[in-house]
Amino acid sequence: MKYPFRHTPYDHQLTALEKGWKAREYAYLMEMGTGKTKVTIDNAAMLYDAGKIASVVVIAPKGVYRNWTDKELPTHTPLHLNEGRIVTWSSSLTKKKKAEINTLFEPHNDLSWFIINIDAVNTKKGYTVLEKFLTSRECMLVIDESTIIKSPTAKRTKATVKLGKLARYRRILTGSPITKSPLDLYSQAEFLNPALLGFSSFYSFRRRYAIMQRRDFGGRAFDQVVGFQNTEELQGVLKEFSYRVTKDECLDLPEKIYMPPRPVELTKEQKSAYDDMRRMALVILEEEEMEASASAAIVQLLRLHQIVCGHLTMDDGTVKEFPNNRIKELDSVLEEATGKVIIWANYRLDIKRISEYLEDKYGAEAFVTYFGDTKDAERQEAVSKFQDVVWKSGEEESYDRAELRQRTGIEPVSVEKQSPVKYFLGNTQTGGYGITLTQATTVIYYSNNYDLEKRLQSEDRAHRIGQHHPVVYVDLVCPGTVDQKIISALRSKNNIARMVTGDKWRDWI
């Protein structure tokens, strides 16, 4: 394929483009870290150059859509298109924002991009603007992380499917089209084209691929899904309009893949507390004059960082909690992730909240914890469970080799066994050193420690001898706060303590 790409695609990305770029409707089912956003940008550019489209609309989750504007489009748009016109939706339609949106409707020869979050589709303002834009020019409509429309009865699904009929080309992007069941596919395919799956309704689709059982509860009868059938047939149908690839299949991918940070919006309570603490920090550090110590600056950074994570330890030791969106964004990332996942969190309260969320959603058997409160005897057990290793002697099995040896006097033999544990939750202070977690292919930093050594060491728990797959790294970040500066410094391998010496702390606070 000859095309003036901004950056040469990997082999699997070229395959995706060769298979799908001309299609009216297509699904890029590419696992997180394999570059489906770049493929989509290149696809849009090729259609634009061929005179097939003039504009692109991207509908994405709230935590993802700004990455298109801030990172992906500036990085991957072919140079001869000069980035085109890019407008990002905002719920507060100020005069300036309205004027910016109106530029999309003005006569011009540039490829224009309109990036909007899925929540806006549910609003009258957002839907009206999208409807007007999609009917004004030949468009490609893209649903990023398309499992956001997996529920056929959801208002946003119905609205998105309706909008899809106005677009000349349609694309869905996701690494995990089936998050809970094969039935998740129906609405995503319906958006592309209702005829693709060959069913006129969700219920006829369900009858073909789900095993139903009549149940009665409290005098109310209903049909419950108890299993699935004809799944190989469904996979064959899906292949006709999609390209599927996993990290395991991409031999040309780099070993470490750093995803754009996932933005987490501050709640109004967090923002108010952050602004108050910021003003107080400025006063405190100014009183120490020009040579405020790095340790004093880091204390203030720590307090600001706690607030963006949703809590603050007061001077008397009590903890004040704030409503926050961090767990919600973590949930979004985990929906996309495949395989086993490490979640690093900096604070005990973070680990407590994440544990509650994981247990509620996936069950207590789905995760292990490894932090200061984890007893020494339980730490190796946690690692072994995550690594799918048990120790067997005769008829006995244990995840703790030393305990079994002491109890039976028999040297255990290592055997492989599938463990139900999918998530390893810990902090870098305790779990970032010396252990091997090579079963993980995704590492999420829910909240970062500002020690560079701990960051580098914790990254290498998954990326070390025994790892045979690329590893994806994802940071959650509150834009415009110390959170963003900490992550930028750590990813650039800069020592934060050295960066806040003298009066440099002002740039951080």
Image: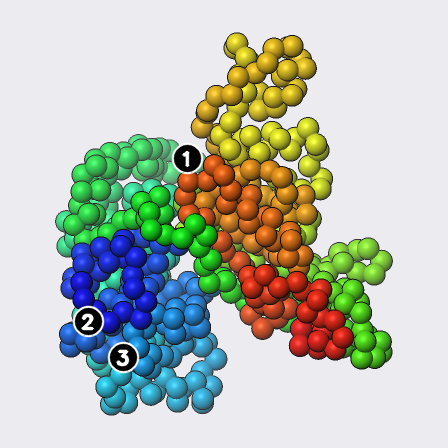
Q: Secondary structure at mark 2?
A: helix
Which residue is nearer to you in this view: 162 or 468?
468
Question: Which amino acid is tagged 1?
Answer: Phe
Q: Secondary structure at mark 3?
A: helix
Q: Position of residue 12 (x, y in %)?
A: 27, 53
Task: Tell me the quadrant of the picture where the N terminus can be found.
Answer: bottom left
Measure how far apart labels 3 and 2 are at the Cα level.
14 Å
Q: Picture quarter containing residue 219?
A: top left
- For residue 172, side relative to residue 236 (left or right): right
- According to the picture, the residue beneath numbered tag 2 turns out to be 47
Mark drawn on residue 217: 1
Q: Picture quarter containing residue 405?
A: top right
Check whether the beta carbons of the residues at disc 2 and disc 1 lie within 8 A of each other.
no
Question: Which amino acid is tagged 2?
Answer: Leu
Q: Picture quarter containing residue 116?
A: bottom left
Mark 3 vs mark 2, foreground winner is: 3
Measure how far apart labels 2 and 1 are at the Cα level.
53 Å
